[in-house]
Amino acid sequence: MGSNILTLCYLIASVTFIIGLKMLSNPASARKGNLVAAFGMAIAILGTIFLYESEGEKLHNYAWIFGGLLVGGIIGTLAAKKVKMTAMPEMVSMFNGMGGACAALISIVEFNHLYKGIEGGAVSAGDVQPTVLIIVLGLIIGSVSFAGSMIAWGKLNGKVKDFSFTGQNILNLLLLAVTIGAGAYLVYDPAQHILVYAILGMALIYGVLFVMPIGGADMPVVISLLNSFTGVAAACGGFLYDNKVMLTGGILVGAAGTLLTILMCKAMNRSLANVLIGSFGGNKAGGAGGSKEQGTYKEISLSDAAMVMSYANKVMIVPGYGLAVAQAQHVCHELEKILEEKGVEVKYAIHPVAGRMPGHMNVLLAEADVPYEKLLEMEQANDEFKTCDVVLILGANDVVNPAAKTDPASPIYGMPILEVEFAKTVIVNKRSMKPGYAGIENDLFFQPKTSMLFGDAKKVLQDVCAEVKAV
C-alpha cells in the first residue's frame, strides 16, 4: 500500500515539474510555475521520507534527515532573501554547483556500498557493471559541474580572473580522455576501488581548467551548459535508485539547460565549440575594431536629455548590467510612467544575453512592475528602432555594439545585436568610457547621433525624472 502511494507521489511530482517548467516560459506565470514545481518537490521529499521501503525496512535517522532539511532550508531562504539582483547569476551558479556536488557524493557513497559487497563476496563484479557505469557517469559529470560552477561563481563576483596558457585546450582534452578511460576501466573491473577517487580528483581538476580560460562575456552560456550537466548527473541518480521523480527532474533540467545553451549560442551567432575554446571576452579581447582608431564622443546634459525625451513620440529603453548594479529598475519604471503621462510611447528592448544570465533583465524589470507587454525581444525591437525618436541605453554595452555587424576584426563580429543606431537619437548612460564585459570598446559611442550621459544609472534617472516633470 505504501509503495503504491509513494508511486502516486512521484507521479504527481513529475507532472508538477513539467507544468511548472511550462509556466516558466511566460513571465506572467513564471512565479506560479516556480511554486507549482516546489510543491511537487515537497510531495516527493515527504513521500520518500515516510513511505519509502527497502527490503521491508523504512528510512530511519529522522533527526539527521530533518536536521539537514532545516539547516539547508534556513540557509537557502536567507540567501535568497538577501541576494541582490546583480548577484543572482552567481547564486544560480553556486546552487547549480551544489547539485553537481550532491550527484558526485551519491556516486562515491553508492560505489563504496557496491565495493563492500564485492569484497565480501555478496555480489560478483560482473553483476554490478551496469550500476558502476551509472555511478561513474554521475561522478564525472557531477564533479565537472561542481568545480566548473564554483569557478563561474568566482568569475561572476570578480574573485576569479580569466586564466589560460599555451596548449591548455590540448591538456584539457588529454585530462578528459584519461578521466573517461579510468572510468571505463573501473566499469570493467569494479574491484579497483582506488580508481573512484582518482576519477573524482581528475574530474574536479578538469572542471576548473574547463571554465578558467572562458571569458566573462560567455558566462551566460557556461552557466546554462553546467546547469544541463547537473541535470544529467541527477538523472544518473534517478537510474541508480530507480527513482522516477529524480529521473524526470534530472532529464527536464538537462534538456532545458541544453536547449538554453543552444539558444544562447544562437543569440551570439557562435558555436558551442567556439564559446568553449575561443575564450571570447577573455584575455585575448582587443579593441573595438582591432586596430581601428576611434573618434571623439560628445556629452549631453540632463536638461537636454529630458527635453529630447519629453518631446519624442517613441522612446526605447535598453537595460543593461549598469542598470542592475545601480538597482535603478524602479526609477526607470518611474521615468517610463512620467513620459507616458506626456503622451510618449515607451518600450524596452531586451537582448537575450543582456546582464549576466538569460532572463536577467526581464526579472529586474518585472521586480519593478514593468508590464510584460512592454518588454520586446531583440527581433521585435530591431523592427521598431527605425521609427524610434530616442533610445536610452542604461549600462548596456556589447549588445549594442555595431562592430558586431560591420567589423570582421572585432571579437564579437557576427553576434546579433540591438540595432539602436537606426533610431534618430541615441543617449547612452554609463559611469565612464571603460569597455564593457567583453573587454572591447563600442563604436556606437563615437557616432554623430550618439550622446553620452555619464553617472550612476539610479542618480541620473532620478535627475532626469525631475527634469522631465519640469518640462
Image (cartoon, rainbow, N blue to C red):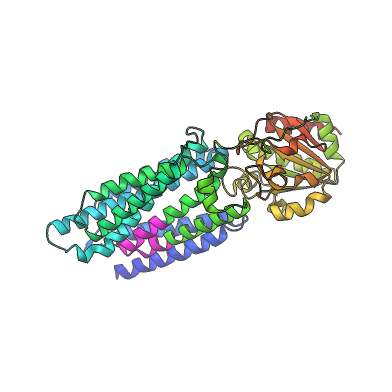
Q: Can residue 118 be seen in this snapshot?
A: yes
Residue at coordinates 74% horizontally, 32% vertically from top-left? Answer: 294
Q: Can residue 149 be seen in this snapshot?
A: no
- Side (left or right) of 384 relative to 43: right
Query: What are the residue bounds of the magenta stretch?
Result: 232-249
- Side (left or right) of 414 relative to 468: left
Main secondary structure along the magenta-highlighted residues: helix
Residue at coordinates 53% horizontally, 53% vertically from top-left? Answer: 272
Q: Nearer the viewer, residue 427 or 217?
A: 217
Residue at coordinates 39% horizontally, 65% vertically from top-left? Answer: 10
The spot of residue 382 in percent (x, y) is 75, 52
Q: Nearer the viewer, residue 255 or 447?
A: 447
Q: Quadrant of the C terminus?
A: top right
- Side (left or right) of 326 relative to 161: right
- Side (left or right) of 211 relative to 408: left
The spot of residue 354 in percent (x, y) is 63, 45
The spot of residue 153 in percent (x, y) is 47, 40
Q: Quadrant of the N terminus?
A: bottom left
Asked if the magenta segment contains residue 26, the reply would be no
Q: Residue furthest left?
A: 120
